[in-house]
Image: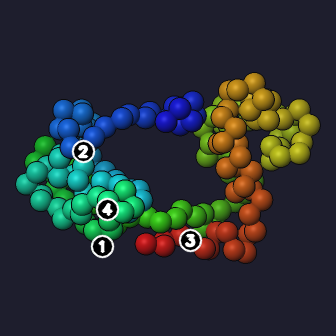
Amino acid sequence: MEIYNMAGYRCLTISAKQEGSVAFLKEEIKGKKVMFGGHSGVGKSTLINTLDPELELKTGKISMSHLSGQHTTTFAEMHELPTGGFIIDTPGIKAFGLIDFDKKVLSHYFPEMRKVLHECKFNDCQHINEPDCAVKNAVEMGQIHPERYFNYVNMMEEDDDETYRKDIYKS
């Protein structure tokens, strides 16, 4: 959570089993179309059932041998909420990937990097080996979490022929 808070994302700790911890969500999603995405068995359907118990979406139990949830939802389905708006329940995702993505602008999709891009010495800085790079400086100064930068570098160095077409919808 610290990594994503530092990047500028709003992160909240909730429990689908404690209605009080998700009550604010009912107001947040009112009148909107929202989707919950994530790995299989993390509780997406359970959370939706907490937000609207009348939906009675199928859920699985936690596997005691693996201490994780089980894949239950098999297709994406949109449900109308009584408070207005819609919620989409999705199957679990096993991997994320990028498709037809221009690496030259990858850093623009990292909010914490986007804040300092204009300070780089070169307009076309890729934030890997260039001198006077504001992104690398921000990492060194603790303004950008090293793990986020590590993920960025890994994405930049992945093979174009494989990376952007593999592991997109493994579920």
The residue that mark 3 highlights is 167
The residue that mark 1 highlights is 74
Amino acid on which disc 2 is placed:
Ala
138 or 95: nearer the viewer: 95
Q: How many marks?
A: 4
Q: Residues within 10 Å of mark 2 (few under 14, many from 20)?
A: some
Mark 1 or mark 4, earlier in chain:
4
Q: CA distance from mark 2 to mark 4?
A: 17 Å
Amino acid on which disc 4 is placed:
Ser
126 or 24: nearer the viewer: 24
Label 3: state its secondary structure. loop
Amino acid on which disc 3 is placed:
Asp
Evaluate if marks 2 and 3 touch, with contact meaning CB atoms under 8 Å apart.
no
Give how far across and how far down residue 4 sits, in percent: 53, 37
The residue that mark 4 highlights is 63
Whether residue 165 sits left or right of residue 75 in the image: it is right
The residue that mark 2 highlights is 16
Q: CA distance from mark 2 to mark 3?
A: 29 Å
Q: CA distance from mark 2 to mark 1?
A: 20 Å
Amino acid on which disc 1 is placed:
Thr
Q: Nearer the viewer, mark 2 or mark 1?
A: 2
Confirm whether residue 44 shows in the render. no
